[in-house]
């Protein structure tokens, strides 16, 4: 045997120019992209809501000479509230581990990215459970995809022959506009729905004369008559630690068509708002902060992430939810 051997002259060490980590892209999370964010200084408060019925009814009358004009008015509801609970997660970095860490590992950097990912995923899951679900929009009446012939409040599933997603969305837009006078401007879809749309014959036929003939989100937005099409790509592992990973998309085979006010203000409707509590010391306008502090009792530094927010459906008639769009 030749001496020295390969193992004698080289000791394996970690590479410093690559490492592997499954970090979801910031753009995969859509919770802060759909509805307007309203920074608030207090954790809870009220807001006013004008009764829509009065504003869509005209009580103007002919006025005879020498008589009073017809009287009218409206009501204001002061009972709607928000409450922004604090969500938090931390990772401890103990001194012994830090002292023994090899390059390119960086305990503080890795912990910061980790807790940030935890919070982004939590926020998208809460967004989906609040907005991207049945029984919330359009007076609780959703439009359901079916494999057979659609009836009332149903559409042909978009992966079935004979379906027409463009017609379905534009019809739903008219429902929202008729109820509110506002045209929906955002369509939120899951990644599986996007895949179907990108290969749908109706969509491909309508874009075949565009410059490249390739389906993009901008082209889909133009086809559906909205300003934006957003794809919710967040993925979660639903298994417990120690079990085999069970991965799935947070947002299912569904779509939400809604009006999200681009300029929120007084006397302005929007399907939803995010109330973010920025009154916490160091919190951003999204109610988010990262803290690093020492815990001498366990000889560790703690990296902690916090978010304080409330997702509110403030005008349910400004949205319509499509469920079971794919078989």
Image (spheres, rainbow, N blue to C red):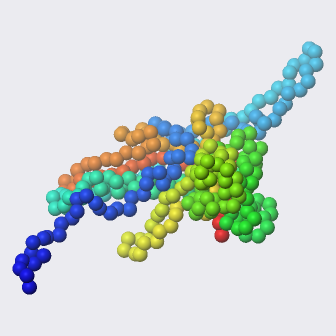
**What is the residue that sits farthest to the bottom in this orientation?**
1
60 sits to left or right of 132: right
Residue lying at 86% horizontally and 21% vertically, measured from the top left? 69
Q: Residue 62, position in %: x, y? A: 91, 24
Q: x and y percent of residue 245 in the render?
A: 42, 72
Return the residue nearer the eye: 228 or 92. Answer: 228
Between 81 and 270, the one nearer to me in the picture = 270
Q: Residue at 41% of width from left, 75% of height from top? A: 244
The quarter holding residue 265 reads top right
The residue lying at 68 percent from left, 46 percent from top is 225
Residue 94 visible within the image: no
The residue at 34%/47% (across/down) is: 290
**Residue 311 in picture, x, y percent from top left:** 54, 48
Q: Is residue 77 above or below residue 2?
A: above
Viewport quadrant of the N terminus: bottom left
Q: Nearer the viewer, residue 60 or 272?
A: 272
Q: Is residue 54 left or right of residue 2?
A: right
Examine the rendering and report whether any part of residue 119 can be seen: yes
Is residue 164 shown left or right of residue 114? right
């Amino acid at each position: 045997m030749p001496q020295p051997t390969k193992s004698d002259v080289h000791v394996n060490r970690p590479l410093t120019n690559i490492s592997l980590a499954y970090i979801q892209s910031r753009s995969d999370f859509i919770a802060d992209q759909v509805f307007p964010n309203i920074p608030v200084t207090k954790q809870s408060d009220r807001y006013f809501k004008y009764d829509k019925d009065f504003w869509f009814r005209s009580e103007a009358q002919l006025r005879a000479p020498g008589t009073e004009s017809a009287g009218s008015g409206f009501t204001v509801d002061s009972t709607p509230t928000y409450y922004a609970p604090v969500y938090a997660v931390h990772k401890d970095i103990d001194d012994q581990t830090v002292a023994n860490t090899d390059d390119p590992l960086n305990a503080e950097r890795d912990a910061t990215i980790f807790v940030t990912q935890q919070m982004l995923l939590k926020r998208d899951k809460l967004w989906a459970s609040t907005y991207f679900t049945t029984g919330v929009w359009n007076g609780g009446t959703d439009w359901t995809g079916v494999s057979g012939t659609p009836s009332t409040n149903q559409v042909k599933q978009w992966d079935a022959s004979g379906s027409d997603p463009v017609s379905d969305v534009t019809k739903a837009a008219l429902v929202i506009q008729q109820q509110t006078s506002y045209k929906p401007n955002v369509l939120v879809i899951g990644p599986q729905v996007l895949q179907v749309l990108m290969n749908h014959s109706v969509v491909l036929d309508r874009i075949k004369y565009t410059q490249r003939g390739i389906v993009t989100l901008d082209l889909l937005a133009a086809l559906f008559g909205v300003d934006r099409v957003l794809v919710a790509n967040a993925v979660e592992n639903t298994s417990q630690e120690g079990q085999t990973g069970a991965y799935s998309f947070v947002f299912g085979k569904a779509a939400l068509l809604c009006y999200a006010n681009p300029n929120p203000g007084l006397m302005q409707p929007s399907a939803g708002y995010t109330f973010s509590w920025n009154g916490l010391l160091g919190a951003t306008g999204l109610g988010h902060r990262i803290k690093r502090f020492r815990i001498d009792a366990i000889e560790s530094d703690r990296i902690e992430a916090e978010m304080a927010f409330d997702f509110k459906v403030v005008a349910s008639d400004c949205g319509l939810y499509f469920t079971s769009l794919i078989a």
